[in-house]
Image (cartoon, rainbow, N blue to C red):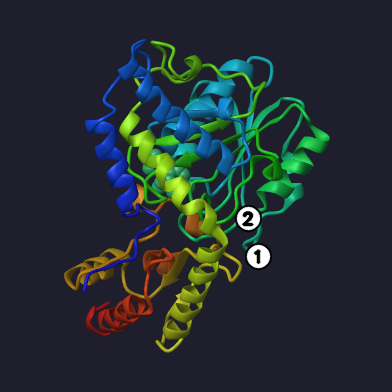
Amino acid sequence: MSVYLDNASTTKPCPESVSAVVEALTENFGNPSSLHRIGLNAQLVVDKARKIIAGSIGADIKEIYFTSGATESNNLALRGVMGAYGKRRNKIIISAVEHASVEETVTALENQGFEAVRISPRSDGNFYIEDFVNACDDKTCIISIMLVNNETGHILPVADIFKAVKKRYPEIITHCDCVQAYMKIPVNVKKLSADMISLSGHKIHAVKGIGALYIKKGIRIIPVVTGGNQEKGIRSGTESVPLISAYGTAVEKYSPTINQRYEKVTGLKKYLLEKLSEIDGISINSPENASPYVVNISAGKRSEIMLHFMEQKDIYISSGSACSKGQQSGVLQQFGITGKSADSALRISMTADTTTEELDLFVEILREGIEKIRG
Ligand code: PMP
């Protein structure tokens, strides 16, 4: 039995998404910008997906912009806003545990002369609203905080932070990377007080190479990719109709079951933690109130070695963040997970389709790995 527990890296596309890709490739191959009927049909496919995605986050259709994924969405949000407003307000606030697509973009913006402040969790592992508010001032342009951390599942108090920031500095633009939250916990732009949010298709059983950026009406953005004026000039380039269609299809499928699936995965996490508690020397790095979809543990053996041991047995997990190709991203250290615990960290990320049999097998092989791997 093959056991895939690396769903925070990517998910298997659902059959409906795959069919949507094939249908768009075979029947709706037109360019949405073409003025004839074949083009119009492609445009209708794009419009339908846009409506579904807008509805799923409480946004207007005109506020959704398709991108190639959340990396691009995060780049567009940060670079675009600094390009539009940065002359007057040059400061960026982020959390110190953001995904590389935010962290590295902010570093690039610092190299261009903008100022950035990174807020760390306190020693209890929690983020405090006042730490963010106190970092803001009249020069602050944008605050960007992720909703669910991809390495540990930590849920950050984004809505509370954004509300407090907006109350004191209504001009500051709020951006949230919702990649690991979307379709797993409810995401609503108004409840979050978010002016922009980034989303990715391949984390929700759609396909790779598609994502979206929500931009609240009235927020100005300088495009990163210029050209034929698609996506109202915010993101030029012929729309990928097949990928967009798959994305809308997956959102339509998974939107109605967010709470049911959350409960199911909460049960799976509980089951997994009980099983793990029977093994000596395992520590759990994810807090109790984390997203149940991501469980970060330390098993005392070097992550890469354990990963390959598991792979030989057809079990697929991740060490920390898959995006950093095994390189430590510093996020675990931010949460107080250092030294051997960080070196031996493993990330198990589930879906509602994960079974207890799969978890049993994972735990069995983990136990075997701990016994067999030396050092
Ligand atoms: N943000 C977070 C929190 C992520 O987990 C990821 C994917 N690992 C991204 C952004 C980047 O998404 P994409 O792969 O769509 O570029």
Q: Which residue occupies 36% across, 46% down? A: 206
Q: Amino acid at mark 2?
A: Pro
Q: Is residue 86 visible?
A: no
Q: Is 89 placed left or right of 199 in the picture?
A: right
Badge 2 crowding class, 10 Å Cα cut-off, few under 14, some 14 to 19, many 20 or more, is some
Mark 2 — residue? 121
Mark 1 — residue? 124
Give whichever of 32, 323 is nearer the camera: 32
Q: Secondary structure at mark 2?
A: loop
Q: Is mark 2 within 8 Å of ligand 1?
A: no
Q: Which residue occupies 27% across, 85% down? A: 371
Q: Is residue 165 above or below residue 266?
A: above
Q: Is residue 97 above or below residue 35?
A: below
Q: State which quarter of the image contains the N terminus.
A: bottom left
Point out residue 89 in the picture as x, y percentages from the top left corner: 68, 21
Q: Secondary structure at mark 1?
A: loop
Q: Is 316 placed left or right of 353 in the picture?
A: left
Q: Amino acid at mark 1?
A: Asp
Identify the residue at the far left of this view: 312
Would you say the residues marked 1 and 2 are in contact, meaning their CB atoms lie under 8 Å apart? yes
Q: Is residue 372 above or below residue 10?
A: below
Q: Is 314 placed left or right of 363 in the picture?
A: left
Where on the image, by quarter, is ligand 1? top left
Point out residue 45 in the picture as x, y percentages from the top left corner: 40, 30
